[in-house]
Image (tube, rainbow, N blue to C red):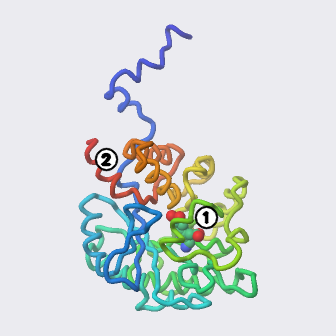
Amino acid sequence: MFPRVRLRRLRRTERLREMVAEASLSVRNLVYPVFVDESIERRVPVESMPGQWRLPVGELPALAEELVSLGIPAVMLFGIPAEKDARGEVSVKPEGVVQRAVRTLKRAAGDELLVITDVCLCEYTTHGHCGIVEGREVLNDPTLEILARQAVSHAEAGADVVAPSDMMDGRVAAIRQALDDAGFERVAIMSYSAKYASAFYSPFRDAARSAPAFGDRRSYQMDFRNAREALREVEMDAAEGADIVMVKPALAYLDVIARVRERFSLPVAAYNVSGEYAMLKAASAAGWLDERAAVLEVLTAIRRAGADVILTYHALEAARWLEEVR
Ligand code: PBG
């Protein structure tokens, strides 16, 4: 073939490269995760996630304005309650921290900002597990009922999308049923379908105060050796009525994202998690990486693998960088 075929010909100028680029990254693909803390009056930095904060509800209107002006379409809300209990009942209160946060954001931004809520128990339980605990066992079926009530309470507050992250079996069906029964058939479910038991969540657990008090999450989150099993998880969530399926984390799981994209026709989301953010921040702060180049490369690679939506703590910075490029 060579010298008649020369692949370098299409790499010669920026215009040519742009014209034939296979993957693209737009601010429209990004979701910004936000930690809302009931016990604080002013924002508190998350040490292990430079540039990220725990925010009081009062600071959300300003954040909403910033996100809208940058063109970021959505937030993912995580609540940090002042008090926790064994069953995570605080998570379903109409005056709970997430419910107040949803109402505040919707009042501030209306339809200009999609509000997605993380549905889980780990931020609300004294033991930090994502389900109801008996002895050392995390129970599946009794957890479904409270997750469903939590999702309905988020919908009542005005959430556009609920995102169950607990990894209990059958939760998408339970949540879909409860939402429909309560008249919220328009509220979408973005399921954390293939969520792995990962070492890359530690900064998040530090931010959300949600580290398990005993054991780990390997009896419900997925084993990182498995990819075929992820397809079974996605298949079940799709059958149960998920509208969007998620793979989490993103970077060490690009193969899983690609396989889910190939096999299913649902929109695919990927969660570029706290540990992935922390790695890039730390290396950039040390002067070992060009942060902007590295972040845009990582986010574009997640798109190339097949993700439609990317949840990333780099959303605001990425939005600014993407604006400069244009
Ligand atoms: C659980 C939840 C976690 C994350 C999102 N939802 C933590 C966990 O499973 O322990 C992690 C997100 C991140 O690391 O950025 N509610």
Q: Which residue is mark 1?
A: 193
User: Is residue 286 in sight in this rendering?
Assistant: yes
For mark 1, give the secondary structure.
strand
Expressed as whole percent of the image width and height from the top left, the position of residue 119 reads 53, 77
* Disc 1 and disc 2 in contact, CB within 8 angstroms: no
Residue type indicated by callout 2: Leu
Q: Is residue 276 above or below residue 192?
A: above
Circle 1 packing at 10 Å, graded few (<14), some (14-19), many (20+), is many
Q: Which residue is mark 2?
A: 322
Residue 172 visible in the displayed image: no
State the image coordinates of residue 47 (x, y, percent, origin top left). Answer: 44, 66
Callout 2 crowding tier (Cα within 10 Å): few <14, some 14–19, many ≥20: some
Residue found at x 69% / y 53%: 227
Mark 1: which amino acid? Answer: Ser
Label drawn at residue 302: none
Q: Quadrant of ligand 1?
A: bottom right
Towards the viewer: 129 or 39: 39
Classify the position of the C terminus by image quarter.
Answer: top left
The single residue placed furthest to the top in the displayed view is 3
Q: Residue furthest front?
A: 286
Q: Position of residue 23 (x, y in %)?
A: 44, 40
Mark sitting earlier along the chain (1/2): 1
Q: Tag 2, which secondary structure?
A: helix
Expressed as whole percent of the image width and height from the top left, the position of residue 147 reads 58, 82
Q: CA distance from mark 1 to mark 2?
A: 29 Å
* Residue under the point 46% across and 85% down: 81
Q: Quadrant of residue 171?
A: bottom right
Residue found 31% across the figure and 47% down from its top = 322
**Tag in front: 1 or 2:** 2
